[in-house]
Image (spheres, rainbow, N blue to C red):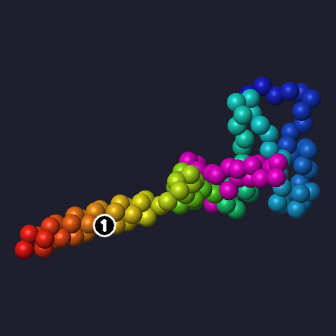
């Protein structure tokens, strides 16, 4: 990665970790849009190479957090109105109603014949 001579290194800008109370770090965006997460942040979040991180925009800020597989699944199915189990139960109830109606209709026919 080519470095511009006018852009100071991150350590030169931040000074020390104490300058940001060890909770904020300057991150540089690379030419391909990549950001390197500093080691103290990775350690605090327990991130290892290959880990998945969730990103969202919140009040004009980019917020990164450890990925939670359950959250990922919920996000995938967020647009679904009902849960799959609710849908299955509704289908089974409808089938039971139809069977009950057919049985009742057949029973009524049999009674009329007798």
Q: In this view, does 55 lie to the left or right of 5?
A: left
Q: Residue at 89% across / 33% down in the picture?
A: 7
Q: Where is residue 66 in the image (x, y as percent from the top left)?
A: 63, 57
20 w.r.t. 3: above or below: below
104 w.r.t. 15: above or below: below
* Nearer-the-camera pick, 80 or 31: 80
82 w.r.t. 114: above or below: above
> Where is the C terminus found, in terms of image quarters?
bottom left
Q: Residue at 68% across / 56% down in the picture?
A: 65
> Where is the N terminus found, in terms of image quarters?
top right
Q: Is residue 57 left or right of residue 17?
A: left
Q: Can residue 114 be seen in this view?
A: yes
Single out the residue that lies furthest toward the left: 114
The mark total stands at 1
Q: In this view, does 55 lie to the left or right of 90?
A: right
Number of other residues with Cα within 10 Å of mark 1, as a class: few under 14, some 14 to 19, many 20 or more: few
Q: Residue at 18% across / 70% down in the picture?
A: 108
Which residue, given by chain and number where applicable, does mark 1 sit on? 97
Callout 1 secondary element: helix
Q: Where is residue 12 in the image (x, y as percent from the top left)?
A: 91, 44
């Amino acid at each position: 990665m080519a470095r511009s001579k006018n852009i100071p290194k991150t350590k030169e800008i931040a000074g020390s970790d104490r300058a940001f109370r060890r909770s904020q770090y300057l991150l540089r965006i690379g030419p391909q849009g990549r950001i390197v997460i500093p080691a103290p942040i990775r350690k605090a979040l327990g991130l290892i190479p290959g880990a998945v991180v969730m990103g969202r925009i919140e009040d004009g800020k980019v917020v990164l957090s450890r990925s939670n597989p359950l959250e990922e699944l919920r996000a995938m199915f967020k647009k679904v109105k009902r849960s799959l189990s609710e849908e299955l139960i509704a289908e089974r109830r409808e089938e039971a109603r139809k069977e009950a109606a057919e049985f009742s209709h057949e029973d009524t026919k049999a009674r009329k014949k007798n």
